[in-house]
Image: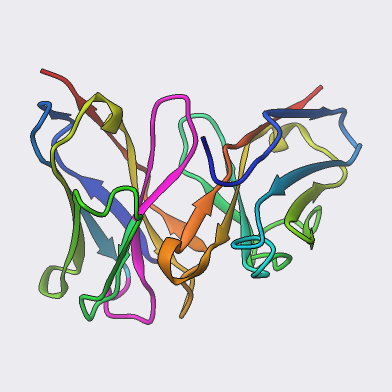
């Protein structure tokens, strides 16, 4: 079955850029699904960051749009997140997730998440 | 401050039923029957429990059900079991500008 695995640095300096990759295994990133990033600050709730389709089309959370870039690499079956100008408020567990088939409104598969700490 | 409002906590005894509410606005919950619910155990990733308001993914117990009235969606868990103790989040589609908004989460305690 399809699995998602996040990877990337666990520590990022303030004002730097957070970069994460989500590897898709057991299935194709070119399926009829959108692929998304969701984050969760320690002890807090979930926040949708943005999503991408294999064609390269993207949607972003308006509150993060100016700092977020999501890209896809079909040759490696993975997609990536870049978040610039990070502060301590960006410290969170970052999840990659798959949206339901031909859907933009529910997440049917999640990665295990990776903690990213913003600190000098 | 989350876009959707959920109670911070609810509790119930084994075998009982509980309902978790998720209140939005006419721009999200009220406009679309596209609310989803997620269960999250400590240290784990969220798990989809209900989508498109009331549909259950394969493998999810029929003790979980979803509904909506006006700007408020609800998740009902019947026949509470110890393993239902977790955090629950709602999420609603909010149109082609905002796209998706989450609730702040509800901690369910099984007494």
Which quadrant of the figure has residue A88?
Answer: top left
Give left or right: position of A77 versus B7: left
Q: Nearer the viewer, residue B105 or B101?
A: B101
Is residue A33 located in the magenta-colored stretch of the structure?
Answer: yes
Residue B30, above or below A114: below
Give left or right: position of B58 versus B10: left
Q: Residue at x 45, y 59 (%)?
A: A109
Give left or right: position of B78 versus A61: right
| Horizontal and vertical percent position of residue A23 | 23, 58
The residue at the far right in this view is: B16
| Horizontal and vertical percent position of residue A44 | 48, 29
Q: Residue at x 73, y 57 (%)?
A: B71
Which quadrant of the figure has residue B68?
Answer: bottom right
Q: Nearer the viewer, residue B72 or B110?
A: B72
Q: Residue at x 10, y 26 (%)?
A: A13
The residue at the far front in this view is: B26
Q: Residue at x 65, y 55 (%)?
A: B25
| Horizontal and vertical percent position of residue A91 | 28, 29
Magenta-drawn stretch, dominant element (helix, strand or loop): loop
Label total for image: 0
Residue B76, above or below A60: above
The residue at the far top in this view is: A120
Image quadrant in which the C terminus of chain B is located: top right
Residue B5, above or below B66: above
| Horizontal and vertical percent position of residue B106 | 66, 34
Magenta residues?
A: A27-49
Residue A34, above or below B67: below
Is residue B90 located in the magenta-colored stretch of the structure?
Answer: no
Q: How is the image coloured?
A: rainbow
């Amino acid at each position: 079955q399809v699995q998602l695995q996040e990877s990337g640095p666990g520590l990022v300096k303030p004002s730097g850029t957070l970069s994460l990759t989500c590897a898709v295994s057991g299935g194709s990133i070119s399926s009829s699904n959108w692929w998304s990033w969701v984050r969760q600050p320690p002890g807090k709730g979930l926040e949708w960051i943005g999503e991408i389709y294999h064609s390269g089309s993207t949607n972003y959370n308006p509150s993060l749009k100016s700092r977020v870039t999501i890209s896809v690499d079909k040759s490696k079956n993975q997609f990536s997140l870049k978040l610039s100008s990070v502060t301590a408020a960006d410290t969170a567990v970052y999840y990659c997730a798959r949206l339901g088939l031909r859907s933009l409104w529910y997440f049917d598969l999640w990665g295990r998440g990776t903690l990213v700490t913003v600190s000098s | 401050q989350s876009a959707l409002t959920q109670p911070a906590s609810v509790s119930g005894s084994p075998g009982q039923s509980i309902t978790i509410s998720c209140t939005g606005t006419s721009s999200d919950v009220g406009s679309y029957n596209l609310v989803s619910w997620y269960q999250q155990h400590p240290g784990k990733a969220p798990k989809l429990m209900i989508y498109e308001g009331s549909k259950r993914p394969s493998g999810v117990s029929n003790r979980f059900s979803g509904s909506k009235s006006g700007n408020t969606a609800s998740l009902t868990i019947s026949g509470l079991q110890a393993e239902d103790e977790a955090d629950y989040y709602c999420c609603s589609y909010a149109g082609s500008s905002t796209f998706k908004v989450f609730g702040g989460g509800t901690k369910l305690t099984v007494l």
